[in-house]
Amino acid sequence: MPDPVPLDLCLQVNGAPRQLSLDPRTTLLDALRDHLHLTGSKKGCDHGQCGACTVLVNGRRINACLSLAVMHDGDAITTIEGLGTPDALHPMQAAFIRHDGYQCGYCTPGQICSSVAVLEEIAAGIPSHVTGDLTAEATFTAEEVRERMSGNICRCGAYSNILDAITEVAGA
Amino acid sequence: MKFDTAATTNPIDRLRIIGQPADRIDGRLKTTGTAPYAYERQDIPGDMAHAYVVVAGIAKGRIGAMTLEDAQAAPGVLAIVTAANAGELGQGKMNTARLLGGPHVEHYHQAIAVVVAESFEQAREAAQAIRVTWLPEEGNYDLAAARTAMGDAGQEDDTRVGDFEAGFASAPVQLDATYTTPDQTHAMMEPHATIAAWDGGSLTVWCSNQMVAWTRGDLALTLGLEKEKVRLVSPYVGGGFGGKLFLRADTVLAALAARATGRPVKLALPRPLIANNTTHRPATIQRIRIGAGRDGRIAAIAHESWSGNLKGGDPETAVDQTKLLYAGAHRLTGLRLAELDLPEGNSMRAPGEAPGMMALEIAMDEMAEKLGMDPVEFRILNDTQVDPADPSRPFSQRQLVECLRRGAERFGWSRRQARPGQVREGSWLVGFGMAAGFRNNLQTKSAARVRLDGDGGVIVETDMTDIGTGSYTILAQTAAEMMGVALDRVAVRLGDSDFPASAGSGGQWGANNSTAGVYAACVKLREAVAQALGFNASDAVFEDGEVRLGNRAVPLAEAGALSAEDRIEYGDLAKRYQQSTFAGHFVEVAVDAATGEVRVRRMLAVCAAGRILNPKTARSQVIGAMTMGVGAALMEELAVDTSRGFFVNHDLAGYEVPVHADIPHQEVIFLDETDPLSSPMKAKGVGELGLCGVGAAVANAVYNATGVRVRDYPVTLDKHLARLPAVA
């Protein structure tokens, strides 16, 4: 079979336009990791099962492995590198360090991207599976956070500490 | 430095930096996504090619024919390596099955080819185009059937003390029960991955591996190279849990692919291949017999375990803790190994003790109930301060009783209802469970180099790995304490075979041994510094970036750029004293009376594991292990297709591990302990202790909630639903 024709696209990655010409089979995750060298987003399963590849697309979190890059022409992508840097940490990154909300570090960027998004989802009143009253304002509870974070697997088992980190940032 | 007598006071005992809950020094890299894992290296020269693995679709048999033409003609393809064109390959000492199979197939998803192409997408596409004709053969895949065929006969290598049969027969209270634990997969978040590049006859691999020296050696053996021609680099490891102790197919195939193409090659194992392609924790069938007097004292205890492995593989050593954990004059332990054609069984976090304690600690719970005793008191009554098989060998430290008492008090154990199935909260059945925790401490030689940068900074270099355990941080704390500098003045470089060989990460031996190796190198460096600055080494104090003695104080920077290398090695202290770590695990669960769903509500571990080098990272090790224990108790099981011989649920959707919603707040208490017989650090391992026993504590809590005893892990709702108390 012939190779697919490359497609041109432009991603707004961490605030900067990035022009790419990609094999259309390229996932958003591989575009970020292999073509833009933003390897903070991790490939744990490549099947949407682990959450290590979580990034924010137009403000909402998705699994970058489950999405083809060419579907995101013009989209604004925020990766872990866009949240903060070693010299200028995002408050969530700093809280993960303080509470030791990670061990091997491989799921960590996805956990942090999800954590940031979860707080925004709660603030926006978006309900979850465990939200009792869909008409009431969503509230920050441990149960809500655990439910909303459950798409991000941490095999090292830092969950208890991750919840502490998120709780601190939420000011709850 | 030879460690062969009990440690006395040394600079570590100051505990200015060691023993403090320092944040991880690699935290800023990990939380910002800037720590480079194996597949992510951007600093490798050359035009990187991508590789994709092709695996066996049968469990046992041969490849009849492999048609490569379509794949070879696919766009971007650079090479296809199979056993037929790879050249002669050796076998690593730690490997049972070959890492590149064909024509003979030894297990399902054994690698049989690697496709190299310009891009990942091209390599993956071409790999699908390889056509294989299989010639399957009959295999043995069913441990239960093998155990039945093997029967109950003992073996010559059984360990016996006293006369178990007579002691058991005459005991007025007896338990004879069989428990099963399933095959489990490590499911570390980072797949096995390697970048390989050749420079003439020399090979460098950047990979994700726990044991740099072992794997370098086995890679050299496999490729027929001198060890000196192989460099292995593994500074960040995205989880291992034993699954990355050894050379695996990713590294061999990347090396072969790079040799075939003359280009650097990167390869990661796709997640759905990992469970069958790599190693796993073998399933066990465990028979436990305990005979006790009516006073609760154990007279006789036997623990036998059946497990399977490929020909040449080892048994799961699930009975080892039973030799040491409880008193009793008459004892029998034995391992039975069935030859199975499932993928290769090998170490997973706390091999032996993890499944062994899952069974033993339910048995102890059952026995306590038979005796009408509280399970905490039953264990305390049967505590031993010496090796039961050799009373002249005391434990170096053994605070099991303190762990249990402290835990019971903290947890509110006195509120437990001894009769199961009695506590209801609305639709929930509520239960408390506990178990002892036990895992041995292992002494292993470990080397390091420590350098002064001439500007007051210290650099540590060792091939030790950090698999999430916190090695970077505790090694920095050790060097900072020893050299008297602030923690942020220490740089730690790990995971490179160019550095001195360490203990590596496994068997919860990493922390104590690798820090002791840095300690040894620091002692040497202090001598060199003292000599350079004109101090008496044994009296000089290294503190606050200075070397001091009497009224004289000289900045460390004035010593210049000195370097020292040494290793810790051990005498016979582990022979003379049994070195082990202990815990008390306490769990509260709620079981939905209608659906049987189990929710873990509270968890507490009280641990006695020598000096805790960093309470923050050590606590993380324990809560992580407790989390894995919840998985083992309630959900983790590789489902075996006993007709076709493979693990069916071989990805992270089918193989369920705990997620956020499964895990409550977890509490960990470390007892104040130092063990001068373990090393100059007076520390012991803790990373596996936290897993040993916790699964049984969960299972015992479920029993206490429901009154339904489940002896086959995982305790899923189908196993107790039909027998739950009537819904009120």
Image: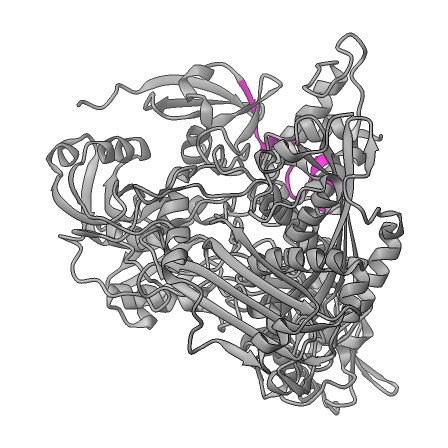
Q: Which residues are magenta?
A: A76-97
In screen coordinates, is B544 left or right of B151? right
In screen coordinates, is A9 left or right of B584? left
Q: Residue at horizontal 66%, vertical 68%?
A: B291
Please say if A10 is above or below B104. above
> On the image, which quarter does residue A99 sit in?
top right
Q: How is the image coloured?
A: one colour
Q: Position of residue B391 (x, y in %)?
A: 68, 86
Does the segment drawn in magenta span residue A82? Answer: yes
In screen coordinates, is B628 left or right of B229? right
Let me know if residue B497 appears in the view. Answer: no
Please say if A171 is above or below B304. above
Q: Quadrant of the C terminus of chain A?
A: top right
Q: Position of residue B475 (x, y in %)?
A: 64, 66
Q: Residue at horizontal 58%, vertical 47%?
A: B632
Q: Position of residue B14 (x, y in %)?
A: 82, 74
Total label count?
0
- Name the one closer to the observer, B640 or B465: B640
Please say if B84 is above or below B664. below
Q: Quadrant of the N terminus of chain A?
A: top left
- Name the one closer to the observer, B281 or B297: B297
Q: Residue at horizontal 48%, vertical 75%?
A: B158
- Name the one closer to the observer, B9 or B560: B9
Q: Residue at horizontal 43%, vertical 64%?
A: B315
Does the segment drawn in magenta span residue A12? Answer: no
The residue positioned farthest toward the top in the image shown? A135
Let me know if residue A69 appears in the view. Answer: yes
